[in-house]
Each structure stands twice: as C-alpha cells, then as structure tokens.
Amino acid sequence: MKILKKSTLLIFLITPFFSILYTITLHGACTKTIKTTLRKGPGEQFEKLWDITLFSPVKVKKYKDQWAKIEDSEGIPAWILQSDITKEYFCGSIKYEKVVIKHLTKNKDDLKSKKPSERGLAFYDQNFKILNFKKGQVAALSPLGNQVLVPRKSLWVQ
C-alpha cells in the first residue's frame, strides 16, 4: 500500500515538471530572412523540402546543434537553421484563399496618424509581422514594408 501511495505521489510531482518542460520547448517563432530552405533533417546534407519567406510563422518543436525542428502552418515538420528564425516578434499567415485587408497610409498633414485607406487582398499563406492587435483586426507589416489591417480570424499566428 505504501509503494502505491509513493508512486502516485511521484507521478503527481513529476507530471507538472514535464508539462512545463514541454511548454518551454514548444513556442512560436518567425523567419527573419528573405528566403530560407527547410530540410528533412538537422543539417545541410539532408534533403531540401521547400523554401519559406520572410515573416513565416513556425512552431518550434526542439533544437539540435544550430538547427530547429519546426512545424509550419499546416503542421508539416521540417528543420530550419536557428539563425533564420526569431522569437522577438509575432508573425501571422493568411489561412483562407482570399482576404480583404486595409492598407494604412499616413495623413500628409499629420505624419504620426495612420488611417486605413484603400482596400486590398491578401491570399492564402501570405505572411505578415504582427505590430499589434486592435478590436478583431491586426495591424501588420508585409515583407514589402506595407502596413495593413488584417481581420484577426483570417490569420494563423505563432
């Protein structure tokens, strides 16, 4: 009976440790290079899978040497150089075929104020750097440097 109580107590003590460790090792990151190649394994000798572009959100699963094992927005695993990703900001990727966005422009009289002007379209898998969240919309920066408002529900954010 004492052995059963000790093992049950040990399980209750160890479980939170592993859940914290699991949470620490899983985190979002963004690509910070114009283009980076994803590979099948942690090294340049491994097969190239595909390329991803600036501000692509990824979920980091684990690290090995200078490589990170990640999942993309579709949950596909791959390896990327750690130097090509950052945790300093959030990124989002359009998860629908086509989404209406608003371009932010500066008022010529007041350079600090940004007002939505023209509408535009963003397409599936287009990436953005998240600047801030505003009432169901996300202020974001495109890889081309355009500031836009994107509906929050249309983004996969990491």
Image (tube, rainbow, N blue to C red):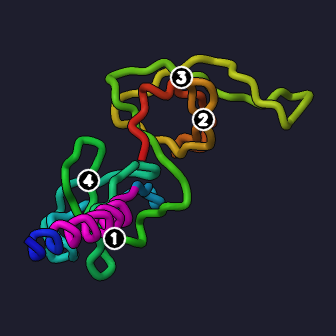
Picture disc at residue 133: 2
Residue where numbered disc 3 is placed: 101
Whole-angstrom CA distance, mark 3 to mark 4, is: 26 Å
Looking at the rendered image, the disc whose residue lies closer to the viewer, 1 or 2, is 2
Q: Which labelled disc corresponds to residue 57?
A: none
Question: In the image, is 150 to the left or to the right of 69?
Answer: right
Q: Earlier in the sequence, mark 1 or mark 3?
A: 1
Q: Where 91 sits versus 82, above or below?
A: above
Residue drawn at (26%, 70%) of the image: 14
Q: Residue at x 51, y 49 (%)?
A: 90
**Mark 3 or mark 4, earlier in chain:** 4
Closer to the camera in the image, 79 or 17: 17
Within 10 Å of the Cα at label 3, are there few (<14), some (14-19), or many (20+) other Cα atoms? Answer: some
In the image, residue 147 above or below residue 44? above
**Identity, as a three-letter code, of the amino acid under mark 1:** Leu
What are the residue bounds of the magenta stretch? 8-27
| SS type, badge 1 | strand
Residue tagged 4: 71
Q: Is residue 31 visible?
A: yes
Find residue 111 and report its horizontal and vertical position in percent.
86, 36
Q: Residue at x 22, y 46 (%)?
A: 75
Separation of residues labelled 1 and 3 (CA atoms): 32 Å
Quarter of the image containing the N terminus?
bottom left
Which residue is most to the front? 1
Dot 4 and dot 2 residues touching (CB under 8 Å): no
Instruction: Say if 131 sits above or below 110 in the image.
Output: below
Of the image marks 1 and 2, the number of the one nearer the N terminus? 1
Amino acid at pointer 4: Glu
Mark 1–mark 2 distance (CA, rounded to whole Å)? 29 Å
The image quarter containing residue 95 is top left
